[in-house]
Image (tube, rainbow, N blue to C red):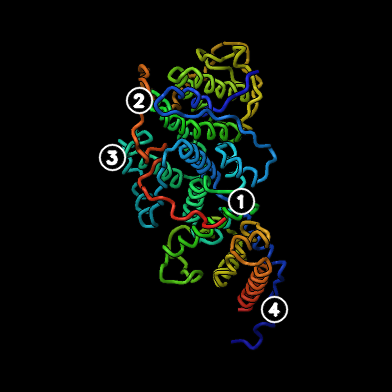
Amino acid sequence: MSLFRGTMRPPTILSDEAIERYLAAIRAELAPDPLFRRRLRGEVTSRFVAASEGIDVAPRSRSMGRVGRAVLYASFTLALSATSVLAASQQALPGDPLYALKRQVEDIRVQVLPAGLHDDLAAYALAERIDELGRLADRGDWGRVEALAVTVEHDFDAFVADSAGADSADKYLTVLRGLLDRLPEPAQEAVQAVIDQASGARGTPPEPGTRGGGTPASSSGGGNSGSAPEAGGPPDDDSKDGSATDEATATPKPKPTKAPRPEPTPKPANPNAGPDARSSNQGPDDDGDDQ
Amino acid sequence: MRDRLPLSTTLGSTLVDGALRAPARAPSAVRPDASVDELAVAATGGDVEAVGRLYDALVDPIYRYVAMRLRRREDAEDVTQLVFERIVAALPRYHHNGKPFAAWAFRIARNAVIDHQRRLRPTEPLGAIAEPSDGVLLEALSLRDEEIRELRAAIRGLTPDQQEALALRYGAGLSAEEAARVMGRQAGTIRGLTFRAIEALRRTLAREQRT
C-alpha cells in the first residue's frame, strides 16, 4: 500500500456537467433497433384496427427466458429443417393455431442473424404478410384481410421510404403483382397504386401485364400516406425488362393458382382471431390506472 | 393524378355487404404538425394514421426509459411492446382532460417496468437486482466507453426513486414537470431526486477513480 496513493495519480473530480454529458451519451446509445421499431409499429396499428373492428386480439406472449432463448438459438437451424411442426407452421395463416409459432420463428431469425441481414429478413417477413393477405383473400376471410392490410401497407411504405429497405422492395413488389388479380377490384387499385408509386420512385418500368403500368388512371401521385415517396408516374414505355426473372426468384414462395373467391361467410365469434393473435389469452392487466 | 387511398380503407369499403361489416376509414384529418395530445384525441376517434404517428412520437422515449431501467435489450423490447399493447387496449378509455397524453403513456410504461422487475426478482427490492451473469447486456451491446459503463453500474446503486427520476429525465427526456406527473410527485421533488442522484453518481465515480 502506497502512502502516495492519490497523490501519484490524482483523481479526476467529475463535475455535475460531466455526469450529465455521460447520461446524455447513455440516452443516445439506447435507441431501439430500427427493425424492432418498424415491426412494433405494424403490430400496434394492426392491433388498433383489430380492436376497432371488435376483434379482441390476445396480448402477445412474452419472449422466452435466457436459457430457452439460448437453446433455441443454438438449435434453430437444425430445428427449422427437422421439425415438422415448425415446417408446418410456415404455412400458417393469421388465426391458425400455428401462426404464433410462425411469427416467433421470424422474430428469432432476426435475432440470430447478423444485423446486416435484417433488412432482407424484414423484406421476407413483409412478403410473408403479403402472401398471407392473398391466401386470406382466397379463403374469403375479409376481416383478417383488412386487419393484415394495415400492417402490410405501413411496412411497405416504411420500406420504400427507407433507403436500405428500398433495395429489398423488388422482392415483394413481385409478390404484390402476383396478388393483384386475387383481390377485389378496389383493393386491386390500391395495390396497383403501391406498385406504381414504388416503380415510379425507383425509376423502374412497370411489370408487363400489370394493370396500372402507364395507364392514365394510375399514373398519379399526391398520396396521403406521408412516408411513401411520391411517384412521378410510371414511364410510358411498356417494354419488358430482364429483371422479372430475378425478381421472381426472390419471391419467398410460389402463389397457389387462383381459386374462385368464396362468398364472405359469417364470421364466427372468435375473440382471439386477430391477425397477430398469440397464444396467451390474458388481457392487459394494467392500463396506467389514472389519467 | 389519383390520390392513393390507404389499402385498409379500400379493403374496408369492399366489405360493407359482408357478414363482418368493416367501416370504411376516412383519410386522417390530423394536421401534419399535430401535437401528441391532438394525435391521442384523433386516435381515440378511430384514426389509424394518428395511432401510427402517436407511436412514432412515443416509441423512442418510452424505449429509452424502459432500457435505462432494465438491463437486457430483449427485456427492454418485450416491455416496450407490452407498453404499446396496453396503450392500444386502453385508448378507448382515454379521455383528454387537460393532462398530457405522454404522462399517461409513461405511467403505463412505469407500471410495466415495475411489474417486470417484480417478476424478475419478487423478493428483492427494486434497484437491488443483481447483474445477470449471462445473456446479452445492454452495455455489451451498445456502450463503448468505460466511463459510461461505470456510470451505469453506479446508477444501479441509486435508490429506486432516483433511478426512476434519472430514467424519466435523461432517458425519456421529460421535463421535471412531466416526470412529476408520471411519478405522482411534485416537480420540486423530481428536481431534488435528480440533483441528489447526480451528486451520488459524481461521488461514486470519483471514489472509483481514486481506487
Q: Nearer the viewer, mark 1 or mark 4?
A: 1
Circle 4: residue type: Pro
Q: CA distance from mark 2 to mark 1?
A: 40 Å
Q: Which mark is residue B101?
A: 1
User: Along the line of sight, which residue is nearer the eye, B97 or B140?
Assistant: B97
Query: Could you tell whether A80 is left or right of A211 in the image?
Result: left
Q: Secondary structure at mark 1?
A: helix
* Residue A91 x/y as whole percent: 34, 32
Q: CA distance from mark 4 to mark 3?
A: 64 Å
Circle 2: residue type: Thr
Query: Could you tell whether B44 is left or right of B118 in the image?
Result: right
Q: Nearer the viewer, mark 4 or mark 3?
A: 3
Which chain does the residue under circle 2 lie in?
A
Among numbered discs 2 and 3, the one appearing first in the sequence: 3
Q: Secondary structure at mark 3?
A: helix
- The 10 Å Cα crowd at callout 3, few under 14, some 14 to 19, many 20 or more, is few
Whether pointer 4 and pointer 3 mark residues with C-beta atoms closer than 8 Å, the reply is: no
Screen quadrant of the N terminus of chain A: bottom right
Which chain does the residue under circle 1 lie in?
B
Vertically, is B161 above or below A126? below
Among numbered discs 4 and 3, the one appearing first in the sequence: 4
Which chain does the residue under circle 3 lie in?
A
* Residue A13 x/y as whole percent: 70, 75
Q: CA distance from mark 2 to mark 3?
A: 29 Å
Q: CA distance from mark 4 to mark 2?
A: 79 Å
Q: Write the residue at 58% across / 58% down.
A: B143
Screen quadrant of the C terminus of chain A: bottom right
Residue carrying label 2: A265
* Residue A137 x/y as whole percent: 40, 24
Residue carrying label 4: A10
Residue carrying label 3: A85
